[in-house]
Amino acid sequence: MNGTHLHTEATQACWELMDQIYDPEIPVLSLNDLGIVRVIEVKSPPADAGIIEVTITTTYSGCPAMDWIANTIKMELSTLGYQSITIKHTIFPAWTTDWMAERGKEKLKAYGIAPPEKRFNIPTDGIPCPQCKSEHTRLLSEFGSTSCKALLQCQDCGEPFDYFKCH
Ligand SMILES: [Zn+2]
């Protein structure tokens, strides 16, 4: 009778759990902030057989963080009582930075990383400084601390900062 209700609640709990798992490369962004979890399908709630299937989108091809993320999801779901956990990876549709939640972009800025912006599809001078908001900034390198970031320096406050590139 209340099977659907149980499923909904169990699914909700899993989505909330995804908010507790953080990207190892950018520890302020949760999986939900990044928007990489596509589908959570509770086939049987933990109170029953505990079968679940989670579909995640690979963010950057060959990003080693994805293995870590998949393993962490498994580990965390098992603490909720799931016995059979399947993580499916999907490549299509490809993850783009558009999927990043606004909340995630705000967190990035607070962390000192300039969030991805469409108008800066190609990293260039003038990406606003996350520290002082100045647009008087200079591109130092197309590749920052990781290949998904570019390195800039603010000409006003002098701070170097990473820009999370558009994908
Ligand atoms: Zn600045």
Image (spheres, rainbow, N blue to C red):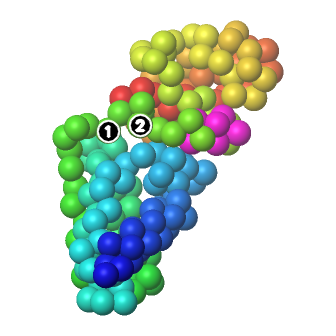
The residue to which callout 1 is attached is 95
The residue to which callout 2 is attached is 99
Return the residue nearer the eye: 107 or 15: 15
Q: 10 Å neighbourhood of mark 2: few (<14), some, or many (≥20)?
A: few
Return the residue nearer the eye: 125 or 82: 82
Q: 10 Å neighbourhood of mark 1: few (<14), some, or many (≥20)?
A: many
User: CA gap, disc 2 to disc 1?
Assistant: 7 Å
Give x and y (percent) for residue 46. Answer: 36, 85
Tell me the residue at 27%/80% (across/down). 44
Q: Which mark is residue 64?
A: none
Q: Residue 41 sits in which quadrant?
A: bottom left
Tell me the residue at 56%/19% (across/down). 140
Give x and y (percent) for residue 158. Answer: 76, 22
Check contact, mark 2 vs mark 1: CB within 8 A.
yes
Residue 143 visible in the shown view: no
Tell me the residue at 53%/60% (across/down). 19
Farthest front residue? 1
Residue 77 visible in the shown view: yes
Element under label 1?
A: loop
Return the residue nearer the eye: 10 or 106: 10
Per the rendered image, the range of residues in magenta is 104-110
Element under label 2?
A: helix
Q: Amino acid at mark 2?
A: Trp
Give x and y (percent) for residue 89. Answer: 22, 55
Tell me the residue at 57%/10% (across/down). 125
Q: Residue 11 sits in which quadrant?
A: bottom left
Q: Amino acid at mark 1?
A: Trp
* Position above or below: 161 against 62: above
